[in-house]
Image (spheres, grey):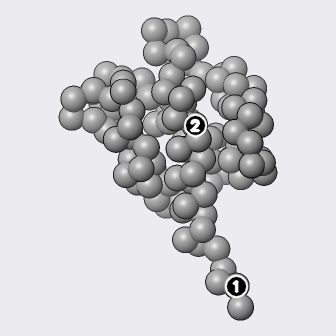
């Protein structure tokens, strides 16, 4: 489980580098949940961070597979008009945003 302070930082990076490219964000978003858009990133950021940390691949395919198996399978959006969610096309950018935050916190190599 990721600490809340880190989740806040991850969400900030996602909003800076990913949300601007989302074709489904409502006017005034993000955040989108208060505006009536059930965003998969906002709903499941902790799980998404965990899956990124648990996957190491140059290909996006394993990330997509883990997303569908570990997040989508349990998502409340699955039975609504909000599925499929933006994660289907924004996942590569979300992975990059999470890795950007992780790089900020990585110990400097000597």
- The secondary element bearing badge 2 is classed as helix
- Does residue 42 appear to the left or right of 24 in the view shown? right
- Does residue 2 appear to the left or right of 42 in the view shown? right
- State which tag comes first along the sequence, 1 or 2: 2
Q: Is the residue 12 above or below the residue 77 in the image?
A: below
Say the numbered circle drawn on residue 31: none
**Camera-side residue of 38 and 61:** 61
Residue 71: % across, % down: 66, 29
- Can residue 93 be seen here? The reply is yes
- Does residue 109 appear to the left or right of 36 in the view shown? right
For the image shown, how many numbered marks are present on the structure? 2
Say the numbered circle drawn on residue 91: 2
- Quadrant of res 84: top right
- Quadrant of res 79: top right
Q: Residue at x 21, y 29 (%)?
A: 27
- Residue neighbourhood size for the residue with mark 1, other residues' Cα within 10 Å, grouped as few (<14), some (14–19), many (≥20): few
Q: Residue at x 54, y 44 (%)?
A: 94
Q: CA distance from mark 1 to mark 2?
A: 29 Å
- Quadrant of res 67: top right
Residue 49: % across, % down: 62, 47
Q: Are marks 1 and 2 in contact (CB under 8 Å)?
A: no
Which residue does the numbered mark 1 point to in the structure image? 109
- Can residue 3 be seen here? The reply is no
Q: Residue at x 57, y 26 (%)?
A: 88
**Camera-side residue of 92 and 11:** 92
Residue 77: % across, % down: 52, 17
- Which residue ends up furthest to the front in the rendered image? 59
Q: Is the residue 77 above or below the residue 2 in the image?
A: above
């Amino acid at each position: 489980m990721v600490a809340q302070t880190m989740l806040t930082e991850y969400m900030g990076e996602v909003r800076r580098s990913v949300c601007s490219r989302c074709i489904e964000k409502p006017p005034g978003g993000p955040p989108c949940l208060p505006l009536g858009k059930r965003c998969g990133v906002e709903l499941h950021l902790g799980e998404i961070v965990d899956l990124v940390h648990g996957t190491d691949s140059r290909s996006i395919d394993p990330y997509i597979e883990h997303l569908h198996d570990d997040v989508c399978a349990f998502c409340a959006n699955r039975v609504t008009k909000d599925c499929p969610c933006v994660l289907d096309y924004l996942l590569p950018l979300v992975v990059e945003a999470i890795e950007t935050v992780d790089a900020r916190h990585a110990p400097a190599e000597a």
